[in-house]
Each structure stands twice: as C-alpha cells, then as structure tokens.
Image (cartoon, rainbow, N blue to C red):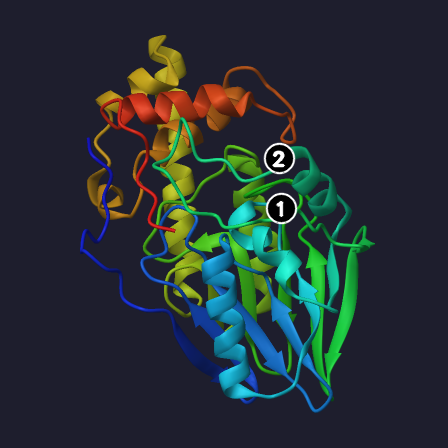
Amino acid sequence: MSTVHHDVPHLPPPRTEEVSDGVFAYIQPDGSWWINNTGFLVGRRGVISVDACSTVRRTRAYLEAVAAVTPQPVRTLVNTHHHGDHTFGNHLFSGATIVGHEGTRAGILDWGEPKAAPFWTEVDWGDVVLEPPFLTYQESVTLWSDELRAEVFHVGGPAHTTNDSVVWLPERGVLFSGDLLFNGGTPFLVQGSVAGAIRVLEEVVKPLGATTIVPGHGGVIGPELIDETLGYLRFVQAAARDGVAAGLTPLETARALDLGGYGELLDPERIVGNLHRAYAEVAGGAPLDHRLHVPTALADMVAFNGGRPLSCYA
C-alpha cells in the first residue's frame, strides 16, 4: 500500500484562524509527516505560543504569521511533547521562555538533531539548534494571557508519547491537544501507548468538555474527533489481539488487515508502528511506558510502504 497524501505540486499555504477572542490556531496543510499545527494567545504584554514547527523555513513563516496579527513579541513558548515537528524550531523564539514537561526536555535531548534518512524522504531542516524547555514541570503549570487562564498539564501517563501535555482554556472551551489527536491523519503511538491513549482520551480529555479542538495535525474541529480517534485505537487493539493469536508479526498483520475507512487517513503505514506498540501491550504484557526499538518499527513501516521512504513534504 502506498502512502496516502494530498499529492499536489505545492501544498496549500498555512492559515491563521481565530478560534476565540485573541486565540489563534496556525494550521499547516496537509498535516502529514513533520507538518504540524501551532497556535498562539495574544495579550497586552506578549504572546504565548503553543509549539514550534519542524523546519527553520516553516517556523519563520509561523513567526511572520504571528507578527501579522500583533506587534507583541512571543514571550512564552509551550512544547506539548518532544517530537521535532513541534520543537525543532524552538531556537528561533529569541527571548522566549520555553516551557515543557520534564520528559519533553529529556526526549528532545535524547532524539537529537533532525534526521530523515533512511525512514523519510529528504527534508531541508535548515540550521536547527536544539533548544529544549528550560522551565519544566512534573504535573502542570498555569499561564495567563492578560486575564485569560491557560492550564498546561501533563496527561498523566503514556499516550502519543510519555510526555504529552495539553493547553486548556477552560473559560473558552478551547483545547490545544498536541498530537493526542490528529484530524484526517493516522494516530501514531510508537513512543507512547495504545491502551494509555485510550485511557487518556476517555478519562482526561473527554471530561474537559472542549467545544473547540486544535489538534496537533489537521483542521480545527469539535469534540467528535475524540470518539473517532478512540474508534481507531480500539481497531488497532483488536487487530493486535488477532495477530498475536494467529502467530503473525506486526508487519504480517498489517499486510493482511483491511483498514476500511481508516485507510483514507494520511500516512496509513503508521498502522504497522501502532501494531508494534499494541503487540507489546497485548502479547508481552509490557508496561505502558515500555520503550520500543523505534528503528525496527520504522523499518517495518517502510517495508509496508513498498520499501520506499515515507513521504515528507516539510
């Protein structure tokens, strides 16, 4: 199966959407590998940014979009998790306090410099300098944009990664979910947990009662995305149980699996990585925060993709 993308010579340009008064989402189509969303809150004395972008070019374009809305500088940058599409651009936020979970700082340093080969097509990252959060928390921190409260908190366990945080604006019903949620894209749990993600969405995210969700990838959407994502995660768990019972490897299970409507999501090869994670939880009884050998899962995803590196348009 080939990777699903909106295959056009040039992707649509990023767009800035005001989702509540003074609260903006920055949406980068098509939301596939390494093409994420960010967002920002505008106050009288400065801007709070939710995440950076993957490349120097994309992060500079985001900062230009902020400047088109307000002359105020970005004083605070929140990282929702450690993945490079949300953090490689941190170093371009000159003078900003970078805030993140303790595990986000550790994860950025552990992953290291940007790299695409051999798993993704080549990416022009620019001159990236790793800049992890230097104000960290274990559970939560509260930020204020004038009188608007922004609750930043770790979700309590592994989900997309082991260090996911959300930015929740309770007065507005707006949630910046990070990569707990993908709209139009396949969820990815290799460095997190399938069972853990189900727990987090059911017990942490859904009870918030968000009416507007800015996902980590894809367009702004409502709370219906939570149940859609839970449906996919349970589909992965069922496939893993069947594959283990049949004595198949995650790659063999993925190749035999009918993805149905989930095959229309961007980057369906992620099913293989997700099965690697679900297998560890179903077959091995591994703890939810058990670290997989990520290169093995990525290599199987490339194999599922016909031996071709995974397409990246960042």
Does residue 303 lie above or below 124 as drawn? Answer: above
Q: Residue furthest top?
A: 247
- The amino acid marked with disc number 1 is His
The N terminus sits in image quarter: top left
Residue 82, labelled with which disc? Answer: 1
Crowd around label 1: few <14 · some 14–19 · many ≥20 (10 Å) = many
- Residue at 68%, 34% in the rendered image: 110
Q: Secondary structure at mark 1?
A: loop
For marks 1 and 2, the one nearer the N-term is 1
Q: Residue furthest front?
A: 127
293 sits left or right of 3 in the view: right
Numbered-mark total:
2
Query: Could you say where residue 190 lies in the image, as x and y percent from the top left?
Result: 50, 32
Does residue 136 lie above or below 294 as drawn? Answer: below
- Residue marked by disc 2: 111
- Residue at 62%, 46% in the rendered image: 82
Q: Secondary structure at mark 2?
A: helix
- Residue at 31%, 58% in the rendered image: 30
Q: Is residue 115 visible?
A: yes
Q: Are marks 1 and 2 in contact (CB under 8 Å)?
A: yes
Q: Is residue 79 visible?
A: no
29 sits left or right of 214 in the view: left
Tell which of 305 and 12 is nearer to you: 12
Query: Could you say where residue 174 lies in the image, as x and y percent from the top left?
Result: 55, 75
Does residue 227 lie above or below 240 as drawn? Answer: below
Query: Could you say where residue 195 lies in the image, as x and y percent from the top left?
Result: 54, 36
Q: Nearer the viewer, mark 1 or mark 2?
A: 2
- Residue at 37%, 66% in the rendered image: 219
Distance CA(mark 1)–CA(mark 2): 8 Å
